[in-house]
Amino acid sequence: MIKCKIYINSLDWNTSFPAISVCEILNGEKMWDLNEEHFGSDRDKFQDDLVADVAFFKGVCSSCKTCVQHMKPECQTNFSVIIDKFRTKCENLLTNCAWNGVNFTCCDAFLPLQTEFGHCFTINSAHTDPEKRMKLISNRESGPGTLNLFALEDVQIHLHSPNGVPYINTEHDLQETILWGLQKEIIFSTAEIFNDANLEEHDFSQRRCKLTSEAIDAAEVRLYNIYSYSTCITTCVAEAQLSICNCTHHLMPKNLINYNEICTVEGLLCLTENFETLTEIRRDCKCFASCEEPEYNIVYSSNDYFGEDLGSPITITMGSLPTTRYIRHTYQLVEYAALSLGYQS
């Protein structure tokens, strides 16, 4: 039987706000305008399809088959040039940021984060530069915490742990697609997990979770230095791409161990032709939960019309400070009822 004592000062802990990542998504009208600007109105409209496939690659490049079969000159464009021209920089993506009513410069705190979607901009992430990182902490003194921002393009918002990253498998409830002119309010709750001091001494096979300090198992591929379920899945997918097509796609985070071959058009075609196989591998990745990640649940999510001329105001709020904590022992989680005193089980 596991014993635990509950004290009233358990209400005084700091609660980390989730990391909030903003990832631009494809906007057909904007892409048309940019193609007109860069390639002219008399361009081969195939150019538009190729740019969309490359700049916002999500596993399938429909235009790559035409590239390989017909050797079209448009296909020789350097992918990094397309990314630079057609993906929005932070200062043109986010504005009017505030934390608990205090304004801050968005791009000083929303830092670039490499993901399988390409660069997203994230706040409160353990994967960004610690000297520039803005930590969002909530407690009894500050209150639950509210983050405000204004998106100037179509975006997808991801709520995840500071140790996690946005990825294709993100739980549906924890990602929100926000199109130009919509007003979004998200209210979430947090369930914190506190590890027993002796948890590290137990074998991994007993605790069935990984500590952030434990390396991802891959011997040749490591995309992140901190373990989380999402970093493990992203690494697993990168391994599969290398195994099947001898390259990883151009938006994938760089390998921290060895230089990984970046796919050319032929490589993207290979990934496209093996899309279903790679999807199955993604589902079967042998990744375990992190021992140190809180759980977030969306309590409320609005989807109101705001106006077409300005952009999209976004408010993300912790509904209330947690009143319970969970202790992870070897085999189970023991709930801390924070309002109880001297309870023993």
Image (cartoon, rainbow, N blue to C red):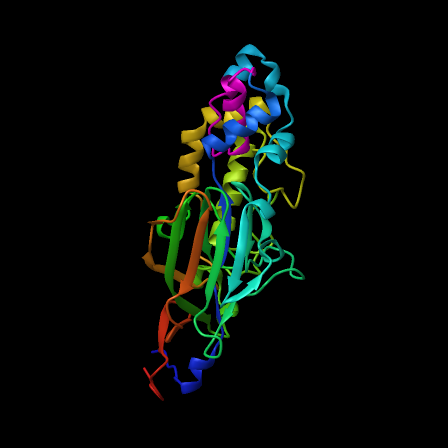
Quadrant hosting residue 243? top right
Q: How many marks?
A: 0
Compared across the picture, whether 91 is left or right of 323 comes to right
**Residue 305: where, in percent of width, then height?**
35, 47
Q: Position of residue 36 (x, y in %)?
A: 56, 24
Q: Quadrant of the C terminus?
A: bottom left
Q: Quadrant of the N terminus?
A: bottom left
In the image, residue 4 sits, relative to residue 23, either above or below, namely: below
Magenta-tinted stretch: 42-65
Q: Position of residue 64 (x, y in %)?
A: 52, 21
Q: Is 211 located above or below residue 60 in the figure?
A: below
Can residue 288 be seen here? The reply is no
In front of the other: 243 or 315: 315
Q: Is residue 57 magenta?
A: yes
- Outermost residue on the bottom side: it is 342
Magenta segment includes 67:
no
Q: Nearer the viewer, residue 253 or 151?
A: 151
Asked if residue 245 lies left or right of residue 192, the reply is right
The part of the image, by quadrant, that contains residue 125 is bottom right
Residue 150 visible to the viewer:
yes
The extreme top residue here reads 70
Residue at 51% from the left image edge and 18% from the top image edge: 46
How far across and down, in percent of the image, does residue 55 sit?
55, 32
**Quarter holding residue 71:** top right
218 over 96 or under it: above or below: above
Taking the image as shown, residue 270 lies to the left or right of residue 284, namely right
